[in-house]
């Protein structure tokens, strides 16, 4: 047998290279939740905006970018860059909460509401799998994308989204942990079941409500 | 620019699970079928977990999520790992 049955004693050694540790020195303000009711449990306020990435950064020009929304009939609803913007871009100011324990308040975003994308989509399915350029996936219930709760974001803090932050466009679902706000969004596929995306398969929570601290399985 | 480390960055985390350092062990990538040492993988540490990708084809080979009192280890991108006696 190569697998050890008891690993509890060495968790500390893992934590030394655990990714969450590397952010505690960047933009750390020291303000904790008891001083700010807008901080979900276990979160710390950040002023800057850390870049998290699970792989190489895709470089997609807006001119080549396309978003596809596929329903259960196999019908594709497609938007190119101009077509997306023509749906109507709105300004939103929201707080974002990363599962690696940082929260950034009052971020100014511009994007297109998912309500606009789903306007002409008829579906009985209740779940959505978001797919990104580069292969990332994350699952979100449809109801969490509608009624003014989610956007295809194209700008943040007055600038077009950098590729490192998911440009040219990313999903923005600020009421869930930020791994749900898939960078480099490419398609949304309706699914009958709540199938796990990338991080959800690999230990993170299927839903991810920061106020309930739904971080892991 | 995303931080990229080599697969030897997995040594500490994997030492929790395996008795010996397995970064020298060879594994087969399910993406390209290539067989190479785990230490040769490309590791992305600035993510909600460590993500190791095949240096040849970018297939995700392994993820390691530190959940405090638990560790989630996925080796789903490696079809086989060769362990020497």
Image: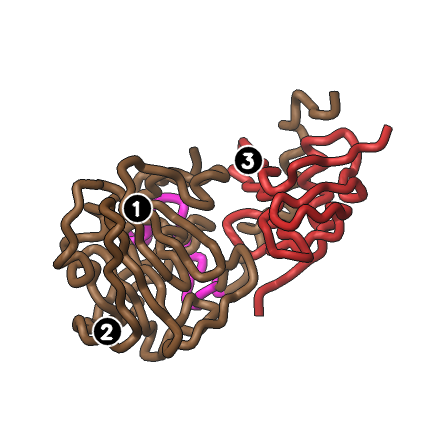
Chain colours: A brown, B red
Of A61 and A56, the residue lying toward us: A61
C-beta proximity under 8 Å, tags 3 and 2: no
Q: Which residues are magenta?
A: A27-50
Q: CA distance from mark 3 to mark 2?
A: 41 Å
- The answer to if A38 sits in the magenta stretch is yes
**Residue hosting label 3:** B72
Circle 3 Cα neighbour tier, 10 Å, few/some/many (<14 / 14–19 / ≥20): some
Image point (76%, 43%), residue name: B23
Mark 3 vs mark 2, foreground winner is 2
Q: How far apart, in angstroms, are the residues tagged by discs 1 and 2? A: 24 Å
Element at badge 1?
strand
x, y percent for residue B36 = 76, 48
For mark 2, what is the residue? A83
Residue sitting nearer the eye, A80 or A10: A80
Looking at the picture, do discs 3 and 2 lie on one chain? no
For mark 1, what is the residue?
A140
């Amino acid at each position: 047998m190569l697998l050890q049955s008891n690993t509890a004693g060495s968790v500390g050694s893992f934590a030394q290279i655990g990714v969450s540790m590397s952010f505690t020195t960047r933009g750390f303000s020291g303000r904790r939740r008891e001083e700010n009711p807008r901080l979900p449990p276990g979160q710390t306020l950040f002023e800057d905006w850390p870049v998290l990435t699970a792989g190489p950064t895709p470089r997609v020009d807006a001119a080549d970018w396309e978003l596809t929304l596929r329903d259960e009939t196999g019908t594709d609803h497609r938007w190119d860059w101009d077509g997306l913007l023509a749906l109507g871009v709105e300004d939103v100011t929201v707080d974002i909460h990363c599962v690696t324990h940082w929260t950034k308040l009052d971020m100014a975003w511009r994007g297109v509401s998912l309500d606009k994308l789903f306007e002409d989509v008829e579906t009985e399915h209740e779940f959505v799998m978001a797919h990104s350029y580069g292969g990332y996936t994350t699952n979100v219930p449809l109801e969490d994308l509608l009624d003014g709760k989610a956007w295809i974001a194209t700008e943040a803090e007055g600038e077009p989204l950098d590729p490192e932050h998911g440009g040219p466009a990313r999903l923005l679902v600020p009421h869930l942990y930020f791994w749900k706000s898939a960078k480099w969004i490419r398609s949304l596929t309706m699914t009958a079941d709540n199938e796990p995306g990338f991080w959800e398969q690999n230990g993170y929570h299927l839903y991810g409500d920061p106020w309930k601290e739904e971080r892991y399985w | 620019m995303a931080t990229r480390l080599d697969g030897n960055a997995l040594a500490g985390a994997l030492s929790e699970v395996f008795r010996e350092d397995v970064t020298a062990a060879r594994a087969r990538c399910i993406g390209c079928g290539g067989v190479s040492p785990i230490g040769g993988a490309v590791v992305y540490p600035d993510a909600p977990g460590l993500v190791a990708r095949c240096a040849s084809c970018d297939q995700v080979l392994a993820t390691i999520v530190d959940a405090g009192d638990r560790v989630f280890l996925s080796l789903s991108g490696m079809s086989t790992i060769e362990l020497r006696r």
